[in-house]
Amino acid sequence: MKKPFRNMTSLVSAAVMCAAFAAQMQVSASAAGNFCENETARFKYTIRDNTAEITDVAGKGFTDETGRLCINVPSEIEALPVVIGSFAFSEMNEPVQINCADVTAIRNNAFFCCSGISEFVVGKKCEKISPCAFYDCDNLESVLFDGSETAVEDDSRLEIESYAFNNCDNLRSIQFKCRDDIIIKPKAFYGCMNLKDLDENSVSQDHSSLYVQEGAFIGTGIVNNPNAVRTADYMKEHNARYNRGDAKKLKGNVLIVNLLVASPDHKTWNPDKAKRMRDDATNDSLLLEQEAEKYGVEVSIDNAFIEMYSDKDRYDRAEDFVDTSNEVLNAVKSEYPFLYRYKNMKDATQALKAFLGYDEIAYVVFAEGNWQSAAYAKRDYEYDYRELAYVYTEWSNSRNHEYAWMHEVCHLFGAMDVYPIRDVDADYTGTYMNGDVMEKDKWPNIGWFIACNLGWTDTVLTKDYNAVIGENTPACNFD
């Protein structure tokens, strides 16, 4: 028989429903033991890892405007942040509304078999929802992951662990407001077969902070609903330009060889500019590693810099610098003389990889030109290591753009440019993308599409997909 202390039900609801009461409540700790109470409930808790972890709750009959029991979880106990512990609200069958906007974590099985839960708000301060936190909450219909209406830089991080919402049969709606990072791990919603939609109505328009690891929506209705998301396989099947199958997956130990090109009439790479390029590449390497980690990918990026002298005059357009295989090879040989006997980039790169001990080596070329700012990538199918990316650095935004280097590195690993309007040099075009590093003039996070392109995740929002392949964009024509 269930203990009298747990003889109550809980229906977790939106923080706004009880926000006024939460602002007024006063929390007092019992001197006789680990209990505290406010006007809505009495809480049992334990102090662990500098947090107050709630282990059981008893309501006092306080009701909201709908007549349902309402419980306001304190924002702190003994001046410590509050965590909802394992089984704290388990097996509650009578509807109850809970305001827990300030809790920092929800432990495994915290809401085990709570058949009364119909909606839940994950507060802005929550950092982790553990496996099986909402296991078998068969009446849970909607979850809101609270945040701001627009992008914020608050260093917040929420991890939704695998099986966090396992077997929530009636879960139909998940909504995300923007936070700095929301990471959805594989099978986080496994068994939620009525969860079928994830589109622009579910996610903040600026949702560049949402990271979906490969397999996040396995075991849900989303994967069977082409109107909600697209998978990598579907994208490859329906868009010949989508090159996931050919793209290198950025994993392991990677060396980026950065070639800084000077021409006879323009000695581009003075010491200050060269230092800035080195600093940018080093800083962005760390950022790229952090972004990959959010998708569950381990990658370590090092950089080498070669100041390359070209016999050509200053380049008027990026296309004037496309035939560079021999120049790049000669520049690499000048830096690593033991490669003197190799005749092509493929063999030289293989030898360099073996000598230096890297899993992958790729090349970025920064060239000076007198045309407008442009990034250009060319494939040379003669070589296995065939991606050479070009970016202008004079009279251009690219010269001072913090993420220009990362944009070019994504080209190296298979990503294509995305533009909101049809452009003569655009690979894809569309009007909706999620702050993707490949989209022109967008805040350059590694968005869902690029992560999908690199093999970090297998799920992309339908509207992002439509933007990439040009659906609903009459100006786009790939014929």
Image (cartoon, rainbow, N blue to C red):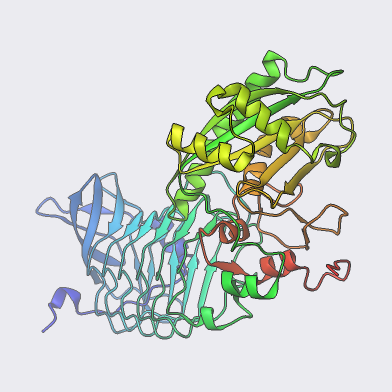
Q: Residue extending furthest top? A: 271
* Along the viewing direction, whichever of 45 and 31 lies nearer the viewer: 45
Badge count: 0
**Residue at x 29%, y 54% (from the top left corner):** 27
Above/below status of 218 relative to 450: below
Q: Is residue 405 above or below residue 229?
A: above
Residue at x 57% of width, y 40% of height: 347
Q: Nearer the viewer, residue 153 or 51?
A: 153
Q: Position of residue 267 (x, y in %)?
A: 79, 17
Residue 32 visible within the image: yes
Residue 82 in percent (x, y) is at 30, 53
Q: Quadrant of the C terminus?
A: bottom right
Q: Position of residue 41 (x, y in %)?
A: 27, 67
398 left or right of 39 in image: right
Quarter of the rendering containing residue 423: bottom right
Left or right: residue 171 versus residue 372 is left
Work out whether residue 154 can be spotted: no
Decide which of 387, 88 is in the foreground and name it.
Answer: 387
Position of residue 265 measured from the top left corner of the image (x, y, whole percent): 87, 18
In the rendered structure, the answer to whether residue 218 lies left or right of residue 319 reads left
* 2 left or right, relative to 227: left
Which of the 4 image quadrants contains residue 368? top right
- Quadrant position of the N terminus in the picture: bottom left
